[in-house]
Image (cartoon, rainbow, N blue to C red):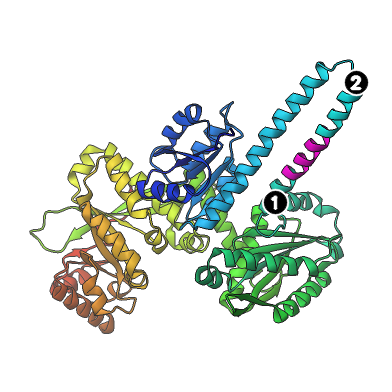
Amino acid sequence: MKQSPTVLIVDDVPENLRVLKEVMDALDCQISVANSGERALELLDRTQPCLILLDVMMGGIDGFETCRRIRCHPHHKDVPIIFVTALADDISRGFEAGGNDYISKPIRIEEVRSRVQHQLEKFQLVNELRELTSSLEEKVRERTADLNLVNRNLRKEVNERRYMQDRLNYLAQHDFVTQLYNRDALDEHISHLISGVQAKTAEHIPYFILIDVNEFRLINDSCGCIAGDELLYQLAIMMSEFADPQRDFCARLSGDKFAIVISQGGDEAVESFFRLLQQGFKNFAFVWDERQFRMTVTQVAIPITLDMVSFEQVVMLADEICYSSKKSGVHSRIIKNAKDLAYEEHRGNLNWGLRIIDGLDKDLFEVHFQQVCSLINDEPKKKIEILVRLKDEETGGLIYPNDFIRAAERFGIVSKIDRWVISNTMQQLSERYDLWGEIDQVALNVSALSVRQSNFAEFIIEQLQYYQLDGSKFCFEITETEALNNFADTRRFMALLHEHGCTIALDDFGTGFSSFAYLMDLPFDLIKIDGMFIKDMHVNEIHYGMVDSIVKLAKMLNKPVVAEFVENQSIVDKLKLLGVEWGQGYFFHKPEKL
């Protein structure tokens, strides 16, 4: 009797383990679980898994390091690994670490089962191929006198082996939903083109086309992932019909994004393809459950030029231009040369994205702090706010958040910075007992993208427990606008941290459009007035009035107030007059390294 394959699920959040186990129970496989990367490595020899579902962010060694160690294991280096992540940026790092596939959070049942079955089939084919190869070699060594019969059997088995080898190659190079080439095949194709770009003439520079399906998320979320997969399959067929099989390379890049590489014909070939595609979408309608959906796309094309050095660079640049075009309402754009509108600006954003990734990989970020001083004479408490800086590799100088945070938010990697700051701050405070004993409160900023992550509050709690720090000494600052724009996520985030003694501040207060009813329902602990109102309130009557109104609102809510950008004694006097409890700025303390 054939034994069911074993799947090892690795996640340090019990709820995630439970959900994945329930999804996998419907498949014919045995389930083993591990709550950390270290535990997963211990279980390898005992469980002999045929597949590993691996969470990215975990206490101890993270998913990427766990994957790298598994790939070094002599007996388990070929076991397929599927990363489970909520961040698009984790996908490329997962493939670099040795991952075979990924599952996006929040998980979709059909997607999980499809990807698991796909990887199990590949793994089974590889093992069968090894066994068949071994069997063939053994039979050749031990062949009998009946050579004709043996040769006949060998020919049959060789044909079977060729079939399995071809099938395995196909699975490794193609997306199982659309049957187009997958991201790995696209990476290989573009890398090959980049290496030969120097030999291209101006008329034959290859072009990379990115196609983003605008309505995919609506259909996928409202009709289900089966409908979403069917839509992608139909769109793939249509795009393949417009492409030249002798010249064009069609692939599914990720999610709702397709990529077409046109290697010959230059901008004329791109313009012709765009016209065909636009006409095709005008004539196309997706039908599901007797409902008809009209589709539109955002399509951009960029030349693969001499200064491009990697597949990731090409994709990030095209994605940045696609994002900017969609925001401006332009849904079809061809970049023909470096002088085109905003091309250099997009390159600048791209370079910042790459610099941030390098900064995280090379540990170039630094944690600084600034004191928050009491404006009430008898207040003995000592507070600090944690600030992040990026070290410039070339000059050794410091780069401030205003220069790189926008790019970090654009590329979805600002949460990685948040996690790095929180983890490193807590590590340093746990090692400096004298400083930790002097401080009554440590304030840390968290981005909206982090608050939206379902496991971000749990990450903070895990760090508190790992470094054995008192949660009541930590205050997490959320901007007022984002708190109200993501009310449900923010409320859950606040509630979980309150359970562990942490306090919450509404940061940059006054820059958004607050609903008093929402403010009363949010469990925040203090208000931080945006510095744009503070820095000139002593000479600007309108800003002084704004600060006065916010302070009165805070008094009604019985919340203390912190004023940012306090730069002179006149501002201090005005704040004291209004009854503001805390002040922060260069007048009191210039930031320094923690």
User: Residue 510 location, x and y as percent?
Assistant: 30, 76
Span of residues in magenta: 158-168
Quarter of the figure with residue 542: bottom left
Residue 464, can we see it? yes
- Mark 2–mark 1 Cα distance, whole angstroms, equals 46 Å
- Residue under numbered circle 2: 147
Q: Is residue 547 above or below residue 167?
A: below
* Prevailing secondary structure class for the magenta stretch in the rendered image: helix
Tell me what residue is drawn at x 70 percent, y 52 percent.
Answer: 174
- Residue 430, which numbered label? none
- Residue under numbered circle 1: 187
Q: Amino acid at mark 1?
A: Asp
In reply to whether residue 282 is colored magenta, the answer given is no
Q: Could you tell me which secondary element the residue under label 2 belongs to?
A: helix
The 10 Å Cα crowd at callout 1, few under 14, some 14 to 19, many 20 or more, is: some
User: Residue 564 location, x and y as percent?
Assistant: 28, 66
Q: Amino acid at mark 2?
A: Leu
Side of 42 where 358 appears, left or right: right
Residue 362, can we see it? no
User: Residue 443 location, x and y as percent?
Assistant: 27, 56
Q: Is residue 79 above or below residue 179?
A: above
Side of 57 where 524 appears, left or right: left
